[in-house]
Amino acid sequence: MSAPLSIVIPTLNVGAGIGSALAALVPGVADGLVREVVLADGGSEDGIAVVAEETGARLIEAPRGRGSQLAIGADTARGDWLLFIHADTVLPDGWAGTVAAHMERHADRAGYFRLRFDSERRYARWTEGWANIRSRLFGLPYGDQGLLISRRLYDEVGGYRPMPLMEDVALARALRGRLRCLGKAVTTSAERYERTGYWRRGWRNWGCLGLYFLGVSPDRIAETYRK
């Protein structure tokens, strides 16, 4: 593979739950596709440094906030391609081949995965189903679906902005017309939805998205989201 891949994961007190995400990366590391795994940490207090040392990941410090952490992680990454995933997102079997094929054939486009939650509840199926429809129809994949993008294209569209919220939506909008579904589905934790309720969290997400499209600042939206 002539264009090695950097995988960037924002972390914040996820040391106890990131193991599955890191374990899924092993095939890509073994076949030479993955150059490095970058953990962009926002000030964890749970021993993430030990996790990084044990797994061979590169740990960097970044201002707290997913947008800032992703931006700093991308800036320090050394690969010609970047794959951004969340710490509670597990790549599917065969992901390395799918990613390598995209890198070889679609350098002018960014790729994202379909979403699946690690829950068998019907509300999880409905929520992930809508997320996949939203991604295809409106070109708005969220960060928990992963994003594969060449360094050249990432820099061309301005990359992730250091925003407290909506950083994934901002980048997806910058990539409009240049996004491609990779076909396979990542598995993401449903814990946040099951803790706060699928409908409640879904409506809150839609409300934040609507405010963003109306021009409300991400800082104001973040305050609303936290409340």
Image (cartoon, rainbow, N blue to C red):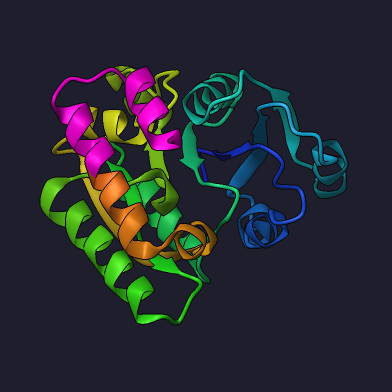
- Image position of 43 (left or right of 6): right
Point out the stretch of residues depicted in magenta.
207-227
Query: Can residue 189 be spotted in the picture?
Result: no
Residue at 27% x, 72% y is 126
Residue 48 sits in which quadrant? top right
Q: Which quadrant holds the C terminus?
A: top left
- Image position of 47 (left or right of 167): right
Any magenta on residue 24? no
The secondary structure that dominates the magenta segment is helix
Residue 169 sits in which quadrant? top left
Between 133 and 43, the one lying in front of the other is: 43
Residue 26 sits in which quadrant? bottom right
Between 95 and 212, the one lying in front of the other is: 212
Residue 125 position within the rendered picture, expressed as x and y whole percent measured from the top left: 33, 75
Residue 141 position within the rendered picture, expressed as x and y whole percent measured from the top left: 29, 48
Query: Can residue 82 be spotted in the picture?
Result: yes
Which residue of the protein is positioned furthest toward the front in this rendering?
227
Between 120 and 182, the one lying in front of the other is: 120
Residue at 23% x, 41% y is 207
- Image position of 116 (left or right of 105): right
Residue 16's place in the image compared with 67, above or below, is below
- Please tell me how many numbered marks the rendered image carries: 0
Residue at 17% x, 20% y is 215
Residue at 71% x, 25% y is 60
